[in-house]
Image (cartoon, rainbow, N blue to C red):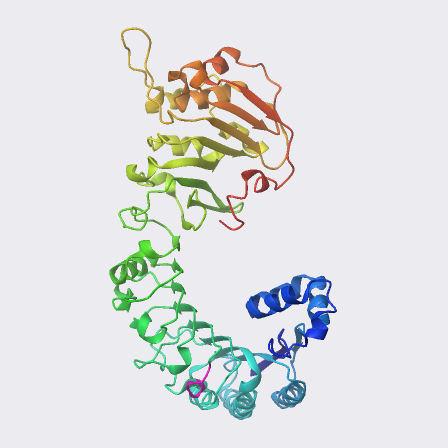
Amino acid sequence: MATVNVSRSIMPVVTRGRMKSARARRLALPTEIVTSVLEYLPLDELWNAALVSNQFYMSAWLAGLFIHRTIAQDLDHSYVRRLLIFEDVLAHAKRREFRLNLSLTCDLPQEDLGRAQRDDASATANRGLEDIARAMSAALPSLVCLSIIMPDYFRPLLDSALGFPAPRLRVFHISRTSRNTAPSLPLAFDLFAGSAQNLRVLSLDNVTLPEKQLLAFQTITSVSFIYLQIFPSIAIRLHFPSLAHLHLNFLTASLAASPKRLDLGGAVLRSIRIEGCEYSALQEAVEMSMDMSTIPFVQVIGETVRWDEPLLTNDRAALCIRLGYVSGHVPETSVSIVPEHRRWQRVYHFSAWEQNRTILPATLSSRVTYLRLDATLVYDFLKLELDLAALHDLHIDLESKHLDDLMLAVPDYGSYQQLKSFRAAIGEDLPRVWSPCPGLNELTLFALDQPVMGADSRHIAFLLHALGQLARQKKYKATLALIGIQFTRPLARTLLDQTVSKIFKYDFAGRGSHEDEDDGLWQSGL
């Protein structure tokens, strides 16, 4: 069965050059500002703004920029009725100069059908696919987004249908419904007749590229590759000379299937994302092709991170780190490293860092100035015994139900005595304690979900002891900031006096407000 989803795209009917200045003057904004916005703001941004802002939608309409909201139709009748509706929509779109988004999904006949029923269903599907392919060809001049999920037997029809120019197409996604691990037929060399000058985004799911350069792909800036097992040979610079953003996803754990011929030589990327079961093989292939330190944004998702790569060693900027769970229900942890100047960021995510003592090499730990982590990870992090000489601010997020995870129950802190910072060396006068954070200025404890009313000051004092604050003079010790945390148990004044210079208390900031309290450093999703 073939399913066609048709939607009218959010797209200006008039071009920017044809916009009437009289209409622009109807806006409250000066004409020159409106003209500049419409001239230089990317169309993607215009569409997004129209979706989220009714005010912008009305302003654009008054200025003569007609942005049509998406109207989707789910068509679940026979393919003949679907095709008739699609042809009606297409004819209407051409008359009104609308742009179209087309999503085509072709499902194989059900395996539980008898052979005769399966053959009949296949014959019906093939007749429908032929008609839909012709309609797709007719729609190409109006398409802005085209998404196709197809079985292998539809490829000849598809190649024929897509052999015509697509002058307005911006996004093209193609995927195989079959989970066949064998290489697919390569895309047709004459795809879109080599004419798709507005095409910017391409997504290939288990579909291979031809060996020759495709003229239709010369303007693409963002590409996503997803492969089940066989990662084919890809010459990025050859196929995508304008590429800026690359996403690689490898869905098998077979080392034998690792990409051997991924060639990024000559590519100038703004971002790269690597993920999958065997993402380390992808990362290795990328590193063999280019210097990853030249890429402003690198994201790696998987089980481990190899810190011996040259990725960060070329940049001597101070670093900030955040350690925490990916989500409240997934027991994975993530590490984010963001240079403090914030002009760009590199982000790493991986799990089980507490078992990996090479989480951060000394060359990087000596540059960390800001560290934020969940309270449940404090002890495991301290066991790594990193030298955080440049660390100025330590921010710990607490959930009320996990308060005891911050430190062991008092007075039993025997396990903490195994930490290097608790092992005092007897000197001539006073015991000397190794300090992992000799430059710490402030320790912040932040209540995430609700105010913490039962905090035991001895827990916090032991934490500061473990951070080496006992070894510092009073005036050089860190300050303690408590946000939404109250001491209701007896204060361990002696311990606090030994480990902290001042205490600042703040009211609970509200559920989920920890991102706002972090000065905008951490973006959502990191």
Residue drawn at point x = 27 percent, y = 10 percent: 427
Q: Residue 523 magenta-drawn?
A: no
Residue drawn at point x = 52 percent, y = 48 percent: 523
The residue closer to the viewer here, 4 or 114, is 4
Q: Quadrant of the N terminus?
A: bottom right
Is 401 placed above or below 139 here? Answer: above
Residue drawn at point x = 38 percent, y = 30 percent: 382
Q: Which residues are magenta?
A: 192-196
**Residue 115 relative to residue 264: left or right:** right
The residue closer to the viewer here, 115 or 219, is 219
The residue closer to the viewer here, 110 or 6, is 6
User: Could you tell me residue 319's position as x and y percent?
Assistant: 39, 41
Query: Is the stretch drawn in magenta largely helix, strand or loop?
Result: helix
User: Could you tell me residue 103's position as x and y percent?
Assistant: 56, 78
Is residue 361 shown to the viewer in this render? no
The residue closer to the viewer here, 41 or 138, is 41
